[in-house]
Structures are given as structure tokens and as C-alpha cells.
Amino acid sequence: MNKEKKIERVQTGVRIEKRLLKVLKSLAETLDLSLGDLVEGIVLHAFENKKPFTAKTLQHIEQLREIYGLDLTAEDSHKLKE
């Protein structure tokens, strides 16, 4: 039985690449999650070196990347310049 854990959320002013945000927001909508819940889930999975998405969801993400022109990859992280 999964027991819900009480947490405290805070508002943050995180800046994020525009196309990446569009993909995340669209994915959250598709999965019926808030953007915050989606990001929390991705980060918690990453902290435990677990994959956050099923193969089906990854296929959908690829479609969204194409729709929004998101050509950035993990290789590009820490190399982005405004």
C-alpha cells in the first residue's frame, strides 16, 4: 500500500529554454499532470538513476519535440547560451 507523503511546495522562478518548456507543458497535459508534478517525477527518477518514461511516452515526446522544433539533446546541456 502506497501511503501519501506530506510535502511542502514552494513557488520558484526557474528559467528554462522556451521549446523545452512547451514540450514539458504539452507532455504534462497529455499525462494529466501539473507541470510541477511532471518535473518532480523526472527529477526523483533521475536521482535514483531510473528511467522516468515508458517507451510509449518516449515516442510521444519525440512527436512533441518535432512539433515544437526542439533539437536540443542531453549533449547540449551546460553548453547553452542566450
Image: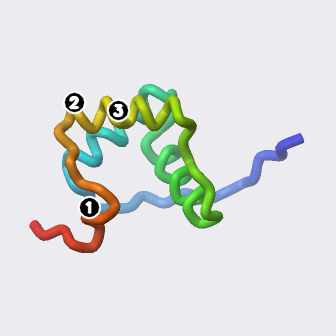
Asked whether the beta carbons under mark 3 and mark 2 sit within 8 Å of each other, the answer is: yes
Q: Residue at x 26, y 61 (%)?
A: 15
Gap between marks 3 and 2 measured at Cα: 11 Å
Mark before the other along the chain sequence, 3 or 1: 1
The residue beneath circle 3 is 26
Numbered disc in front, either 1 or 2? 2
Gap between marks 3 and 1 measured at Cα: 17 Å
In the rendered image, which quarter contains the N terminus?
A: top right
Q: Secondary structure at mark 2?
A: helix
Q: Amino acid at mark 3?
A: Ser
Q: Amino acid at mark 2?
A: Ile
Q: Is residue 4 left or right of residue 79?
A: right
Callout 2: 10 Å neighbours few (<14), some, many (20+)?
few
Mark before the other along the chain sequence, 1 or 2: 1
Gap between marks 1 and 2 measured at Cα: 21 Å
In the rendered image, which quarter contains the C terminus?
A: bottom left
Q: Is residue 66 left or right of residue 1?
A: left
- Which disc, if any, is residue 67? 2
Residue closest to the far left: 82
Q: Which of the colour schemes (rainbow, by chain, secondary structure, one colour) is used?
A: rainbow
Q: Amino acid at mark 1?
A: Arg
Mark before the other along the chain sequence, 3 or 2: 3
The percent coordinates of residue 80 (x first, y second) are 18, 68
Q: Residue at x 62, y 56 (%)?
A: 50
The residue beneath circle 1 is 15
Q: Secondary structure at mark 1?
A: loop
Residue closest to the far bottom: 78
